[in-house]
Image (tube, coloured by chain):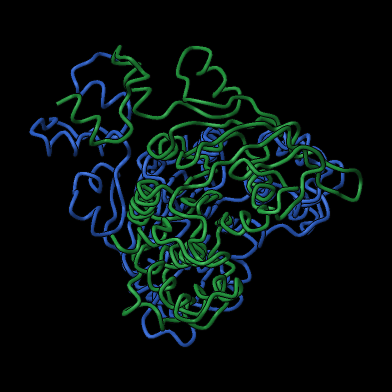
Chain colours: A green, B blue
């Protein structure tokens, strides 16, 4: 458990250092965020007046059809793209707040297919890149790297000196995640983290995210996988053509079902099962084990 | 109806195939056999690194086998350069990363690219491209720059470009990975339609419910064939499924969890409807 405690920032450190902000996850809010991409012909609007809230330590599934703006929203939250209008609030602070830059450094973004960005010649150096760039002292870098590798199931004794390209695809994905976790994010943004992983590696990743949640890290998870979104996330934010189509608790009423369908989504498997069994869908199980318990 | 598989020579006929990447210490594929007939939809599953994408490249004539007893794709010998060149023309391959496949300045030009290389008349290309854009919901994106699209839009554009060219065989490497649930259903429906039209389809996937819907499943383990047969036979062997790093469709996972809690179901369900029947509810 020591790795988790470290990642949750249980031991506050000197200002600007790892874990500086204490143990809690970070809260997030979007206030009427708008953003467009510049293309040769004309700007293409990607986000329009997007407002939502995610409490500290909460978990939010970011869903919607292909091209609805999910990846763009993650990039804007991370600060890689500045909104044209509106604002992203981190722990209630807006960009004019003097703490804002420091808060942004505590937001971790795991890109789509992040293994394509592995570049160092050892797993250790790849994971150390972020903490070094933040200017952390060597011994803190070393411990953060070891903790992150342990957490993603790549124990340093076996993996630290391996070449990233010599790892399997699933191991590379977890290594890339370790590179983000080493910077001890209090808010973790994940862009389709399950894509192309085999089911066994998916189960491992679900376990890792559950442990991060238990440690208080706030999760914003963009995914097309409604079953994993339902298993992991308390609430849902549905984007449709760059606008908020729904935000808040999961809604499996008739209207909620229509809204999912209109955004090219479907009910989670166990919710559909509960509906077809005539049971209360809002008490539907999130995992096979929970479903079996109820049906035993 | 297409003739039954036994009456015609297979469109992929691979036996004892080996491949090793330069500098690697082990074979990426070892002693692999694969036969796919026209009108067959064969799913290939396996853990990350088990050799699935390598197999796709070999079937498409993009890599030279290290050795094989025989390796034929559409009758072309993959062991010789001329045969691989011919296979590159006749085997449609959708790569796992659509960005490796998108070459043009806008979506419709990308979808037209293969047809232009075949020197189709412009009017025919126009009709075919319109048909593909409609099939994959890309009409509104036709003038957009491919590199600016979302992951799912790129994947649909690449798939439309591969399918636009009429062929007898397709190798699709995780074609639905980036798609929303409705997009997945659309692609699976298109794959089944093409199978019914007589195409041979090799379909690499990490989605166990997609594999469950294929005619046959081949499971790879470190480059060798660990299972070949129907999906039910694979999923019924829970120990093998776990060893291969795979899983069961959600219905099957629930059945396993129920068995662990003392309520075994007589048949292993792989779909919602099968699950409801197994639980004693009429559907």
Left/right of residue A165 with respect to residue B239 in the rendered view: right
Percent from the top left, x then y, of residue B67? 41, 80
Q: Nearer the viewer, residue B243 or A200?
A: A200
The residue at the point 45 percent across, 42 percent down is A57
Among the 4 quarters of the image, the one containing residue A228? top left
Percent from the top left, x then y, of residue B32? 35, 68
Looking at this view, name the residue that lies furthest to the left.
Answer: B262
Vertical order, A77 against A201 (above or below) = above
Left/right of residue B157 with respect to residue A137 in the rendered view: right
The residue at the point 23 percent across, 59 percent down is B243
Count of labels in the image = 0
Q: Nearer the viewer, residue A196 or B70?
A: A196
Q: Nearer the viewer, residue A226 or A96?
A: A96
Percent from the top left, x then y, of residue A276? 33, 16
The C terminus of chain A lies in quadrant: top left
- Kindly tell me whether residue B187 is visible in this rendering: yes
Percent from the top left, x then y, of residue B141? 78, 39
- Kindly tell me whether residue B72 is visible in this rendering: no
Vertical order, A178 against A124 (above or below) = above
């Amino acid at each position: 458990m020591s790795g988790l405690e470290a990642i949750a920032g249980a031991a506050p450190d000197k200002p600007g250092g790892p874990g500086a902000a204490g143990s809690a996850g970070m809260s997030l809010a979007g206030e009427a965020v708008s953003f467009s991409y510049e293309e040769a012909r004309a700007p293409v609007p990607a986000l329009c007046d997007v407002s939502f809230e995610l409490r500290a330590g909460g978990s939010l599934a970011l869903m919607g059809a292909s091209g609805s703006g999910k990846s763009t929203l993650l990039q804007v939250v991370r600060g890689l793209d500045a909104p044209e209008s509106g604002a992203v609030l981190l722990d209630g602070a807006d960009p004019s707040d003097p703490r804002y830059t420091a808060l942004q450094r505590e937001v971790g973004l795991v890109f789509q297919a992040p293994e394509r960005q592995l570049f160092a010649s050892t797993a250790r150096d790849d994971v150390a890149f972020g903490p070094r760039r933040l200017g952390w002292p060597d011994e803190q870098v070393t411990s953060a790297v070891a903790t992150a590798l342990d957490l993603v199931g790549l124990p340093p004794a076996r993996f630290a000196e391996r070449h990233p390209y010599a790892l399997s695809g699933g191991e590379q994905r977890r290594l890339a995640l370790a590179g983000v976790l080493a910077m001890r994010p209090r808010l973790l943004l994940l862009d389709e983290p399950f894509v192309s992983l085999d089911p066994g590696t998916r189960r491992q990743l679900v376990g890792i995210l559950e442990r991060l949640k238990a440690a208080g890290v706030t999760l914003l998870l963009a995914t097309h996988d409604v079953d994993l979104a339902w298993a992991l996330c308390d609430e849902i934010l549905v984007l449709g053509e760059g606008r908020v189509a729904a935000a808040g608790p999961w809604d499996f009423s008739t209207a909620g079902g229509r809204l999912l369908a209109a955004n090219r989504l479907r009910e989670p498997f166990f919710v559909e099962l509960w509906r077809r069994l005539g049971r209360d869908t809002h008490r539907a199980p999130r995992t096979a084990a929970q479903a079996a318990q109820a049906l035993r | 109806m297409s003739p039954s598989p036994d009456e015609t020579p297979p469109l992929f006929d691979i036996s004892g195939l080996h491949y090793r990447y330069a500098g690697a210490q082990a074979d990426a594929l070892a002693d692999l056999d694969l036969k796919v007939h026209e009108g067959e939809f064969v799913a290939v599953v396996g853990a990350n690194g088990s050799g699935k994408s390598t197999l796709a490249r070999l079937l498409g004539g993009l890599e030279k086998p290290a050795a094989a007893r025989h390796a034929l794709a559409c009758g072309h010998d993959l062991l010789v350069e001329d045969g691989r060149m011919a296979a590159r023309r006749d085997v449609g391959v959708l790569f796992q990363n659509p960005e490796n496949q998108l070459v043009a300045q806008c979506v419709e030009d990308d979808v037209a690219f293969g047809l232009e290389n075949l020197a189709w008349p412009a009017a025919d290309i126009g009709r075919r491209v319109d048909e593909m854009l409609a099939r994959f919901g890309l009409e509104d994106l036709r003038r957009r720059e491919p590199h600016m699209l979302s992951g799912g839009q790129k994947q649909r554009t690449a798939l439309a470009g591969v399918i636009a060219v009429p062929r007898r065989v397709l190798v699709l490497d995780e074609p639905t990975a980036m798609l929303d649930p409705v997009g997945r259903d659309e692609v699976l429906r298109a794959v089944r339609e093409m199978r019914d039209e007589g195409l041979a389809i090799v379909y690499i996937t990490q989605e166990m419910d997609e594999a469950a819907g294929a005619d046959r499943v081949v499971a790879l383990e470190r480059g060798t064939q660990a299972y070949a047969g129907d999906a039910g036979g694979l999923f019924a062997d829970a120990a093998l499924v776990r060893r291969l790093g795979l899983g069961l469709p959600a219905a099957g996972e629930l059945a396993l969890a129920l068995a662990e809690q003392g309520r075994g179901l007589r048949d292993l369900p792989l779909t919602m409807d099968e699950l409801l029947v197994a639980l004693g509810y009429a559907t």
